[in-house]
Image (cartoon, coloured by chain):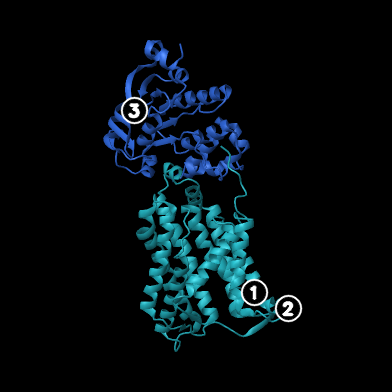
Chain colours: A blue, B cyan
Amino acid sequence: MLSVRSLQLGYGAISAVRDLDLEVSPGELVAVIGANGAGKTTTLNGIAGALPVRAGSILLDGEDITRVPVHQRVGRGMSLVPEGRGIFARLTVAENLDMGAYLRRDPVGVRADLARNYALFPRLAERRSQLAGTLSGGEQQMLAIARALMARPRLLLLDEPSMGLAPLVTRLIFDTIRAIAAERVSILLVEQNARAALELAARAYVLESGEVTLSGPSEGLLTSDAVRRAYLGE
Amino acid sequence: MLGSIYALVALGYTMVYGILGLINFAHGEVVMIGAMVAISVVLAIGTGGLPAPIVLLAGVAVSIPACMLLGALLERVAYRPLRDAPRLTALITAIGMSIVLQNLAMIAWGRQYLSFPPLLPNEPHAFLGATVTGTQLLIVALTVSLMGALLLLINRTRLGRAMRATSQSPALAGLMGVDVNRIIMLTFMLGSALAAVAGIMIAGYYGQAHYYMGFMLGLKAFTAAVLGGIGNVSGAMLGGLALGVIESLGAGYIGALTGGFLGSHYQDVFAFAVLILVLVFRPSGLLGERVADRA
């Protein structure tokens, strides 16, 4: 599905991600864990096209999309749920969802997906004509995820979906992610909450100062001493 | 009447500001060029054979695309390369573009006033106790319909939604698949089309146009946009109409108020007094920033 090879990303004189290799197979849920500032968000932005790639390549379904501009990557089946609940605060909930389906030309399918999203997130259905900026943090995160689903992505990129949310809401969001993965959507999940991410994902990468230091099946990482000490607080 | 023209021009300022955070000071010059192009077309066709409305429509039909092209060109050549530059750099560039366009117009059309042939009906009618001409009625009716169409476009269509999304966050809009550069260029073109209409209206109403006419008009329309709340489309409409009324009433009563010391040629004072008062007491304008963003 997604194949990232020797990716280099940075801002100005700062090199944020070095030599990153990463794979997501079709239908797989893969996590990237690491501390604040390890380069997790940078990696996702680079993959989504929001940040120019300095070196390396990004392949989606075997096609090189490294130089494809950000707005054309959505059409190729990739949707990013940005960090910090990136929603359009001054658009209504319904308009936000319409923006998610911006490139789609099948009104019937869009209506069906809208109904499915409202069934998945009843809170959003209740608030469909409210401005998105008036939603609670958890509702905004749900809206961001629902909006990404409106593009009917084959690969969903999730950036810190639990950030700043109460534990109960976090559990709800993670249950939703599990439900999306069950529908064979490939997911690349970036999380600071390492335990939750590892419990959800089949495989994971550990990112430290812009480099992958460990990777493998989640069970292995959950029991690895290095991970337990550094990220699970044991 | 004057207010509706201010409103049309103010829309161009406010739409570009809403999407880029840039005050496009060259916008007044787009209005001027709209008027000049229309006059040139009308004079070239001549008023002899064809009926007046056809001649006028021909002028409009050439002037609007010309201004849209100019708007697109301004965006592409002057502002896009500065998209990530500090705001002041873009602002100074806008002032520079305004001077460049004025001088180009002076070279192309000369320094003299061009007169707009009397194509519009000018006989007075009694209307609700006031005396108005057919031209005035036409201008108001056209402006109102254009504004209605614009509001529909912005609030009800996919393009309008993309414009609003881009104005809130270009990065996020890009992630939705919106070609942000295209939306910004279309915003300039839309504003410029309205500017062309405004330019033709004002030239038709006063019967003349001049390479310098965009300067004062631009400043007043900018005042109208600030009065309504810059970045707010309905605000620009309200601000334009309000400014027109304030100016007309002010010009009418200033003589009486000052015992004949100041005359109606002090009309321009009112627009800028309004600008200063708004900036001091309500910088967000009449309709600005009603909605607080959470998170």
- Which residue is denoted by mark 3 in the rendering? A210
Q: Are marks 1 and 3 in contact (CB under 8 Å)?
A: no
**Residue A86 visible here:** yes
Q: Residue at x 45, y 42 (%)?
A: B172
Circles 2 and 3 in contact, beta carbons < 8 Å: no
The answer to whether marks 2 and 3 sit on the same chain is no
Q: Amino acid at mark 2?
A: Gly
Q: Please, which chain is the residue tagged with disc 2 on?
A: B
Task: Please state which amino acid type lies under the numbered disc 3.
Answer: Gly
Q: Residue furthest right?
A: B129
x, y (%) of residue B208? 49, 81
Q: Three-letter amino acid code at disc 1?
A: Ser
Using the image as rendered, state which of residue B133 and residue A193 is in the foreground.
Answer: A193
Q: Residues within 10 Å of mark 3 (few under 14, many from 20)?
A: many
Do marks 2 and 1 share a chain? yes
Point out residue A10 in the picture as x, y percentages from the top left corner: 33, 36
Q: Residue furthest front?
A: B261
Using the image as rendered, state which of residue A137 and residue A202 is in the foreground.
Answer: A137
Q: For the point 44% across and 60% down, which residue is it?
A: B188
Q: Residues within 10 Å of mark 1 (few under 14, many from 20)?
A: some
**Chain hosting mark 3:** A
Which residue lies under the disc numbered 2?
A: B129
Q: Nearer the viewer, residue B290 or A116?
A: B290
User: Which quadrant of the structure image shows residue A79?
Assistant: top left
Distance from the alpha carbon under mark 2 to that under mark 3: 75 Å
Residue at mark 1: chain: B
Left/right of residue A23 with respect to residue B115 in the rendered view: left
